[in-house]
Amino acid sequence: MSESLGSAVPLGTAEPPPPAPVAEPRPYAAQRVLPLRRPGRWIVSAIVLVVVAQIVHGLATNPFFQWDRFQYWFLRPTILDGLLITLEVTLYSAVSGLLGGILLALARLSRSPVLRAVSWVYIWLFRSVPLIVVLLFLYNFSALYRTLSLGVPFGPAFLTFDESRLATDMVVAVVGLSLNEAAYAAEVVRGGILSVDQGQHEAASALGLPKGYQFTRIVFPQALRSITPNYVNQLIGLIKGTSLVFYVSLLDLFGSVQSMGSTYPGDIVPLLLVATVWYLILTSVVSVVQFYVERYYSRGALRTLPPTPLQRLRTGLRDLRNRVRKEAAL
């Protein structure tokens, strides 16, 4: 009797509703995270693709570019001879300019006021004077000094050189570019040396290492991480700057194009395109070398080396294949 009274529902009260069924969680494979939609990005990308397609179509279909003549001139011996001279001038100027820049940078950082002053004046002068002025001045240097001599100042000369025979067109071009390049390379090298942490200098000095050993084995290898990208930019500018040696009667790549354009005035545009493509190839090769040099010198500073273009391609294909498989499983 008591049990029935205890379980009875009092009069005037509503019966409580039954509990709502609990939804079972969806399996992890069935859950999808939808990315945030960005219509502006797609619109801008579509506009860029349309503009690029228009440019490519204009280059391919415009008869004014004369692509058949471009194909004819691209590998002609005259063009290849000029390209070889461009490579020689770039190589000699880059090596001598870098060596001169290292010496100037060390002079700027030395404790000698004379070396600091001379280095500063040199860098200030050649960074201020246009390269074409330097080349033309050296080309006409024989009008100022017909002979060059080594000896005691204001005294007898021990060695005498005929400047007109010594200063050939190649020598004038290499010397002019090297003098100009050394001024810019000096600032690049100095900035790279200053980027090395001061603790590295102090640790090397605490070990009692000679100054030369400190620079060649500790400071300079670390500075190359900062020097390499900046100097490669200078090197690319040097490749393009070799086009000015045409004004000192040296037929490099641009000089050969100019000479052929004067002989065949109807082929000026395809000849300029030939020079443009060759300069693009040279600068692209230098950029590839820059990537691997930077990757080499970043081994001690980064936990993982940056992937190469081939590794990026493989990773992209693998991610795409995994994504397709995941979409097919859903």
Image (cartoon, rainbow, N blue to C red):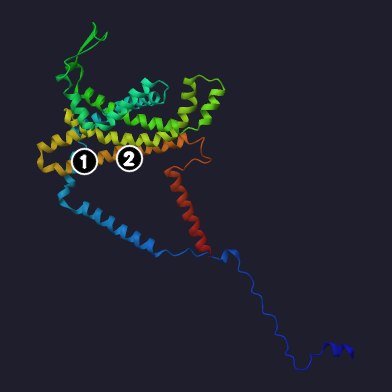
Left/right of residue 105 with respect to residue 5 in the rendered view:
left
Nearer to the camera, 60 or 176: 176
Q: Amino acid at mark 1?
A: Val
Write the residue at 36% across / 20% down. 114
- How many residues crowd mark 1 within 10 Å: few (<14), some (14–19), many (20+)? many
Judge left or right: residue 84 versus residue 192: left
The residue identified by callout 2 is 284
Mark 2 residue element: helix
| SS state under label 1 | helix
Residue 278 is drawn in which quadrant?
A: top left
x and y, in percent, of residue 284 in the image: 33, 40
* Among numbered discs 2 and 1, the one appearing first in the sequence: 1
Tag of residue 274: 1
For the image, the number of numbered tags is 2
Up the image or down, 28 lies above or below 286; here it is: below
Find residue 275 and report its image quarter.
Answer: top left
Residue 173 on image: x %, y %: 23, 26
Q: In the rendered structure, are the residues bearing label 2 and label 1 in contact, judged by CB atoms less than 8 Å apart?
A: no
Give the left or right position of residue 20, taking residue 156 as reference.
Answer: right
Residue 83: x and y, percent?
A: 24, 33
Q: Residue at x 29, y 59 (%)?
A: 50
Residue 240 higher or lower than 114, as above or below: below
Q: Residue 52 shows which numbered tag?
A: none
Residue closest to the eye, 183 or 166:
183
User: Looking at the picture, which amino acid does disc 2 mark?
Assistant: Ser
Give the residue at x 46% y 48%: 314
Q: Quadrant of residue 280?
A: top left
Q: Position of residue 302 (x, y in %)?
A: 51, 39
Can you say which quadrant of the picture contains the N terminus?
Answer: bottom right
Q: CA distance from mark 2 to mark 1?
A: 15 Å
What is the residue that sits farthest to the right in this orientation?
1
